[in-house]
Structure formats: structure tokens, C-alpha cells
Image (cartoon, helix red, strand yellow):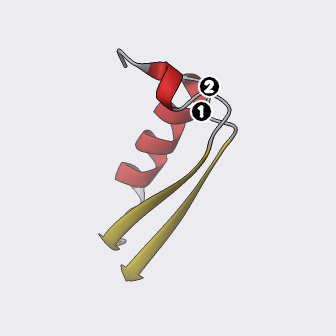
């Protein structure tokens, strides 16, 4: 990521419309944590 200052030490909520395998949310959360996010949570509408 180029501008990690925007996410450093932030609590981030990922929103997704459909949860199937969870791979997309997992990879996104992992990338955000690796760039300095304090925490990452997720919310999905349908499973």
C-alpha cells in the first residue's frame, strides 16, 4: 500500500455484501494489519 498513514493505528471496519469463503475479507484484513491498522473487523449482509 502506498499511503499507509491513512490506516496506521486505526480501527477499521470492512463491509461486504456476501460472505462465502471469507478469503477476500481475510486477505484484506491481513494487508491492513500488516500496514499498521490497530484492528480490523468485518460486517457482511448475507451468508
User: Which residue bears the numbered disc 1?
Assistant: 33
Depicted 7 relative to depicted 45: above or below? above
Determine whether 32 is above or below 13 in the image.
above
Q: Residue at x 60, y 27 (%)?
A: 8
- x, y (%) of residue 17? 29, 74
Farthest top residue in view: 2
> Would residue 20 be seen by someone viewing this image from the given angle?
no
**Distance between mark 1 and mark 2 Cα atoms:** 5 Å
Q: Is residue 3 above or below residue 47?
A: above
Question: Could you tell me which residue is drawn at 43 percent across and 40 percent down?
Answer: 27
Tell me residue 3's x, y (percent).
40, 19
**Residue at image coords 35%, 15%:** 2
Q: Could you say which is closer to the camera, residue 13 or residue 34?
A: 13
Q: Which residue in the protein does label 2 denote?
A: 36
Is disc 2 placed on a helix, strand or loop?
Answer: loop
* Residue contact at pointers 1 and 2, CB within 8 angstroms: yes
Residue 24 shown left or right of residue 32 in the figure: left
Q: Is residue 45 left or right of residue 26?
A: left
Quadrant where the image shows the N terminus: top left
Image position, residue 19 (x, y; %): 37, 71
Horizontal side of residue 39 vs 13, given as left or right:
right
* Res. 40 in view: yes
Task: Name the residue furthest bottom.
Answer: 46
SS type, badge 1? helix
- Identify the image quadrant of the C terminus: bottom left
Between 10 and 30, the one lying in front of the other is 10
Amino acid at each position: 500500500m502506498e499511503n499507509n498513514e491513512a490506516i496506521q493505528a486505526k480501527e477499521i471496519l470492512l463491509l461486504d455484501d456476501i460472505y462465502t469463503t471469507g478469503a477476500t475479507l481475510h486477505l484484506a484484513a491481513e494487508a491492513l494489519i500488516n500496514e499498521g491498522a490497530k484492528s480490523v473487523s468485518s460486517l457482511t449482509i448475507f451468508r
